[in-house]
Structure formats: C-alpha cells, structure tokens
Amino acid sequence: MTGMKEALKKKEKTESRQQYTISPAAFQDHVALVLIALATALFIGQGEGLEHFFGSFLLTSLLMFIVYRDILRYKPHYYKKRRMMLLLGLMLLITMGVGRGAEVALEGMVRGFQLDVGDTAKYGIPIPSGAMLIMLLFDFHTAIVISVVLSLLAGLWQGDPSFTVYVFVGCLTAAFTIIGCRKRTAILRSGGFVFIANIIGVVTVMLFNGELLTPEASYAIIFAFISAVTVVAIVSLLLPVLESVFKVTTDISLLELLDLDHPLMKNLMLEAPGTYHHSIIVGNLVEACSELVGINPLLARVGAYYHDIGKSKMPEYFIENKSMGASKHEKLTPHMSSIVLISHVKEGVELARQHNLAEEVVDIIEQHHGNALITYFYEKAKEAPNGESLSEDVYRYPGPKPQTRTAALLMMADAVEASSRVLHDPTPARISALVDKIINHIFLAGQLEECELTFKDISEIKSRFTYILNGILHKRIDYPGFDLNQEGASRAGEGKQQADREKAGYRPDPEGLPNNPYVSGR
C-alpha cells in the first residue's frame, strides 16, 4: 500500500509540472483561430461596409479565443487531437455558411411567391444544426459553448438582439434533446423538439416586439417549421460524412458495433469461443464501472468485445480456447511462445482497421496489455540451459501503456476476469483478495501512469469488480437425483485442468491466487 501511495504522489507531481507552452503547434492554432474569425466575419459582414466587417472580425476573434481557452481548460483531450480542433473550426464555418445559403434561398422563395413576410424569413435559418452536430461529435459542454457563440454571431449578423434569444433557445434544445442519442432516428425526434422550441422563441420575440397578432407572426411560425426540418436534413446528411472523414466515434456508431452479428464478433465466436465468452464477461465488468470513473459505457463495452479479436488468428495457443490434449506451447521455445502471445495485439489492431472500427476502439486494442511482461515465459527462459536471450523487452508487450481511463479500466478487467478462472474455491474473501492483488500489481508495474485514473477511482473499481465476480462465480445448489460431482471424474478433471493451466502460464501461489495478472494466454 505504501508503494502505491508513493507511486501516486510521484504521478501527481509529474502532472502538476505539465503546462502548455508556446510551440509550433500552438502558433498554428492561433493562426487557425484568426483565419476562422476572418472567414466568419466575411459571412456576417458581407455587403455591410468595411467598419462593420472589422467590428465583426474583432468580436469573432474574441469569441474564438474564449472557445480555445475553454477547450484547453476543460477538454484538453480535444486539443491533443488536431483533427478534432480542425473539425470544431469547420463546424462553425459550415454552420454560418449553411445559414447564409439558407437565407439566400428563403429570400429567393419569398420574392418568387411575392410574399409580404417582413423580416420573418430569418426564422427559417437552420443554425441549431451546428449545435446538434457538435453535441453528437463532441459533448454537451462544447455544444453549449458553441451555442452561445452561434447565437451572438447570429444576432450580430441579423442586427437584431432578439434573434440571439431565438437562436440560443433552438441551439440549446437541439443539444439537450440529442443527449444519449443511440439511433439515427433520434435526430428526427430532436428536430420535433427544435420546432417546438422555435415556436416558443418566435412567440417570445413577437410578444416583446408587440407583433404577435400581426400577419407576420404566422409566417414566422412557418419559417420556424422550415428551420426544424432543415436541421434534421442537414444533421442526417453531414453526420455520417463527418464521422468517416474525421474518424469521430459517436454513440450511434458504437451501438452498431455492439451488434454480435458483426463479422469480427461472429468469427471470434466460431474460431475462439473461449475468448468470445471472456470478452462478454469483461464487457459486463467495464460497463458496470464506467459511470464510477466518468467514461462512456458504450465505448467501454465495445472495447471489451473487440479487445481480443486478434486471438481468432491462432486461437489454439490461448488457454481459454484449448481443447483436450497437450498444450501447443510445449513444442515452442519460451521466446516463440511470447511472440505468439504478443502477436494477438498486432493482429487485433490490423483486423480492427481492416473493418474500419472506431479509432478509440483500435487504441483500446493496442493498449489493453500496456507494456506488461509475460512473466511465465520470461521465467521459463531464465531456467532454460540453452542460454536463450533474457532481455525483458523481448518478453514484453509493445505498448503503449493505457492512455485513457477506458483503456486502463479494460486492462484491469481483462486481467481480473482471466485470473478469476483459476481460483480453486472462489469464496468472497478469495475473490476480494484476488482483485486487490491483480490491480495492485498493475498499478505498481506503472501501467496506469499515463491515464487519468485517481486512487479513488481504483478503489471504487476494486469494490465493483469484487461485487460482480461474487455474483458470477458463486456456488450453486446440487440438483436432486443428479450426481454431478463424481469423486473420480471430478478429481481427474480438476487435475487435468490444473496441469493445462500451469503449462499455459497459470501458476497459483500458496494462497490459491494467481501470482501474476499478466498470465499467459491473456
């Protein structure tokens, strides 16, 4: 425990020294902010004169700087992904560009039908589409910040402060009603709420201006409906394109990956049924802990389902898929055995990319073993008389260590679930001791140094793992009339299972607990 506290203090000191400095990347960001502000000012100040343009440019630059600092402060993981910063800037430009195009189209329609609508055509501009897309591609916090920016820019653009209120109500509704969206049809439902919000916004503005009972009010409601319909169309059209081009993972795409009929999952079930079952149990463990540590439960479960897909290439070399008979590793040197085990990570990454899995899922596959040492084969190589290379690097997974809380949680769940299979008598006390030992080993091995898990998170994860494993591994009552535990068969089977486990790297200590969380075959 003392070692864990010292390691945690060292990690906190290292993180406290990390500060953002002016770098070429930061300079590029500032240039990009200026360019975005310039382009946005062109949309806003088009045809309004030079002074209006410069005023728009100054205000837009200030708003862009505020957004930039907000991301650095509250969402630094977006800053580290350059494509996400680029996407955010493009979303602002796309929203304003679509708004300008919609304004031109609506004005053309009004002129074509010779309608006397006053200035109500502006209520048909689909600015809430930007807030909805940002909610789907980023998060609620970012969507609210951008909603404020879009509302202020829209009010400046139309020269009408009341229009700022109308746009903000629509954007806020679009972002809020799409939270937790797991089906593309939810976009249509959210569009309905946007229409209701638009009507409320129109009525509010008309009441303020004393125009509620004028003919223009009915036209304003019609344009509010057009805005909501256009929002649904724009989001439905752009979302899959932006997901693909910028490799963004949304809950919608994650839910599609949870389909067990996915080719990778079907292949894993047929070729490596033991690994398939293990992945399902790991998925239950990580999803149960996801809310405790503030991560996306869908991403956690999807990562668990696919983290071992590389084992489908050579399933017979992994203990959970081994049928009766001698272990395949008996004919291999320790070095070759370690290469086989390590290869499942590389194979998994390649399969994931071939099937266009989300980049976050690929990262989890790559990081779920970190740079852990395959202790069993390393120790076996040390005992060999042939002088085989004893460099630890040869017997380590290539890494990197988990970079996110999701990858770290999956690493712990993977090791705990695998190790729980070798408990001779899975009592609550033994399960609790196993979870403590496995997770402490991972922590002290430095595998959690590069993620954001806190000591409190780790403690809560231990408690939740213990609770779930007690439910999975508990004993059941005997079935009357069935002798399912014949003395001879039971002992022979247990002896054979234990021999197979020891050959594949499972070596329990005198307390009945595995002596290494990074057991062979896992």
Image (spheres, rainbow, N blue to C red):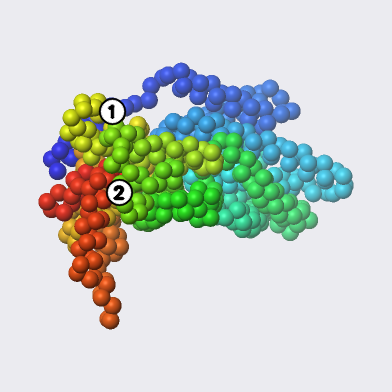
Residue at point 20%, 47% (across, down): 507
Residue 368 visible (yes or no): yes
Q: Position of residue 23 (x, y in %)?
A: 42, 19
Q: According to the image, label 1 marks what residue?
A: 393
> What amino acid is found at the position of numbered circle 1 in the picture?
Asp
Residue 378 quadrant:
top left
Q: According to the image, label 2 marks what residue?
A: 326
Tell me the distance, in whole angstroms, between the alpha carbons under discs 1 and 2: 28 Å
Q: Nearer the viewer, residue 328 or 160?
A: 328
Q: Position of residue 14 (x, y in %)?
A: 26, 29
- Asked whether, in this view, residue 92 is left or right of residue 316, the answer is right
Q: Which mark is residue 486?
A: none
Q: Nearer the viewer, residue 162 or 36?
A: 36
Q: Nearer the viewer, mark 1 or mark 2?
A: 2
Residue at point 28%, 34% (across, down): 333
> What amino acid is found at the position of numbered circle 2 in the picture?
Ala
Residue 384 quadrant:
top left
Q: Nearer the viewer, residue 449 or 522?
A: 522
Residue 258 visible (yes or no): no
Q: Earlier in the sequence, mark 1 or mark 2?
A: 2
Residue at point 65%, 48% (across, down): 236
In the image, residue 100 above or below residue 480: above
Within-10-Å neighbours for mark 2: few <14, some 14–19, many 20+: few
In the image, residue 398 above or below residue 325: above
Q: Determine whether the residue tagged by mark 1 lies in a helix, strand or loop.
A: helix
Residue at point 40%, 49% (across, down): 304
Q: Determine whether the residue tagged by mark 2 lies in a helix, strand or loop.
A: loop
- Asked whether, in this view, residue 43 is left or right of residue 29, the answer is right
Residue that protrudes farthest toward the top in the picture: 24
Q: Position of residue 25 (x, y in %)?
A: 46, 21
